[in-house]
Amino acid sequence: MHRLDRPVWASLTTHHAGVSEGNALARRFLPDVNLFAASRDESPDALAALAELVKPGETVFVAEVSEIRIPPGLTEVRAARGIQMVATRSLSGEPRDARIRALTEADAPEMLALAKLTEPGPFLPRTHTMGAFLGVRIDGRLAAMAGERMRFPGYTEVSGVCTHPDFRGRGLARALSTAVVAAIEARGDRAFLHAWKANRSAIGLYETLGFELRTEVNISVLTRTG
């Protein structure tokens, strides 16, 4: 099985081990970093370990290529299909928008507000610490951003791509995605990303940047009710 088939587990056990909790059977991101969790495999012991990481009232996201097995004790509150795309051409020579700047801890409140408004995916108070994020400000406002999420040897995920409704239609998502991919490429990793299967506008954008479909992905939202 390729690590891209279980990207959450691959990330939690390598680059992001320091912002996760759990053991060799199951891990999850710290509750203020992200909502994703994963088991090592589908064995009863691993699924039980995953369930133990979810406290009553909490919600976690599971994303992987194979069919998701619901751990005993947890309930699936949402199931959806996504796609996984991988970069197939270099973007290192693409011109960079001069307005693009690295986002820092000082930008965190605005990043969270923008993500809550546009919903690019689970984004919590410390999601921005998972990787480098870039943004564009217009008239002092954070107009758009893009950054990194899952990361493991050889691969980094492009994520958090979003534009404030007041600034859409200006090519900001494309410019920021290009810059993020170029930075990933520069350190020797290959960029990949996930999108909802029905989000044709996002998929179309990524296709113009040279991303190609690798596979479909199952996404499950799980909770413990008691």
Image (cartoon, rainbow, N blue to C red):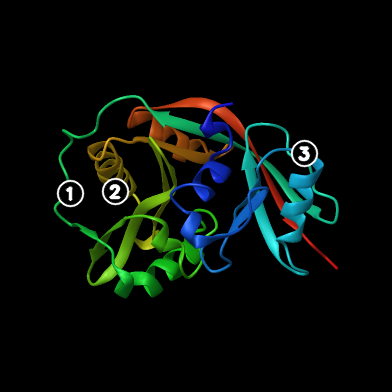
Three-letter code for the amino acid on which mark 1 is drawn? Asp
Q: CA distance from mark 2 to mark 1?
A: 8 Å
Above-or-below relation of 182 to 86 = below
Considering every residue shown, the one lying at the far front of the view is 24
Q: Residue at x 38, y 35 (%)?
A: 154
Mark closest to the chain's N terminus, 2 or 1: 1
Mark closest to the chain's N terminus, 3 or 2: 3
Where does the image place residue 176, in percent across and percent down from the top left? 29, 48
Q: CA distance from mark 3 to mark 2?
A: 40 Å
Three-letter code for the amino acid on which mark 2 is drawn? Leu
Above-or-below relation of 76 to 142 = above
Three-letter code for the amino acid on which mark 3 is drawn? Ser
Label 1 element class: loop
Examine the image and state in which quarter residue 22 appears: bottom right
Q: Residue at x 49, y 65 (%)?
A: 117
User: Which residue is labeled 1 in the image?
Assistant: 97
- At label 1, counting other C-alpha atoms closer than 10 Å, the crowd grade (few under 14, some 14-19, many 20 or more) is few
Label 2 element class: helix
- Name the disc covering residue 176, or none: 2
Above-or-below relation of 111 to 1 = below
User: Which residue is labeled 3 in the image?
Assistant: 43
Examine the image and state in which quarter residue 212 appears: top left
Q: In which quadrant will I find the C terminus?
A: bottom right
Where does the image place residue 43, in percent across and percent down from the top left? 77, 39
